[in-house]
Image (spheres, rainbow, N blue to C red):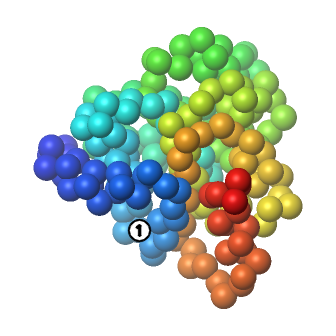
Amino acid sequence: MRLKPRDDRLLLIAAFKIMLRRYILADKMGLGKTLHTIAFFRALKNLRNVPGPHLVVCPLSVLSSWMLEAKKWCPDMRFIRLHTCDIDERARLKHTLLNASASFDVALTTYEMAAGTTPLARALCSHIQWQCMVLDEGHKVKNDATLNSMALSRIRRRHTVLLTGTPLQNNLRELYCLMAFLYPHI
């Protein structure tokens, strides 16, 4: 099963206008936020000629799911997995990021890799201008004093999308932190 061109157009009409800003997609778990995001990347590439690079930061527990869904629904797009424990492989991935960012459309990594102190994490933060950064489980940045929030806020990107299946609590401080992450210059 593949996404049909009309699916791209419908998604683009609804989402691209939002994409001009930064936003939070909050919905119950299991309702397709991952698939919608993958389809959105495809719509940006195919209908708006915005190939990327895009960055998805997610928990390690769902990284494989992101890769499987991407291959299943958008086999024509190039997704790269930026997660490994092997030091040599990290060096190769860093080289790919710095010298061949046109060789992929979407990079998928984990919070641990993106917020770490490795050369790969530094390359994610400072050497690439990402078109869109998506944080799966975006509520992880609801506290601006955490390492995740501070490290991810340094990533250079044009647009930010926070995906969350966890409802926002009636906590003004958490809401402020999420909005400050989305709009750091306000």
Report x, y in % for residue 57: 60, 46
Count of labels shown? 1
Q: Is 65 drawn above or below residue 164 in the view shown? A: above
Residue 125 appears left or right of 64: right
Please identify the residue farthest to the front as the structure is shown: 186
Residue at image coords 76%, 77% = 173
Residue 137 visible? The answer is yes
Q: Residue at x 76, y 55 (%)?
A: 149
Residue at image location 68% in from the left, 31% down from the top: 124
Residue 21 vertical placement versus 78 (above, below) = below
Q: Is residue 165 above or below residue 104?
A: below
- Does residue 117 appear to the left or right of 9 in the view shown? right
Q: Please provide percent x and percent y for residue 171.
A: 71, 84
Q: Amino acid at mark 1?
A: Gly
Lateral position of residue 32 relative to residue 172, left or right: left
Dot 1: element = loop
Asked whether residue 56 appears in the rendered view, the answer is: no
Residue 87 or 174: which is nearer the viewer? Answer: 174
10 Å crowding of disc 1: few (<14), some (14-19), many (20+): few
The residue where tag 1 is placed is 30
Q: Is residue 22 above or below residue 118?
A: below
The residue lying toward the viewer, choosing from 85 and 47, is: 47
* Residue 106: x %, y % from top left: 47, 34
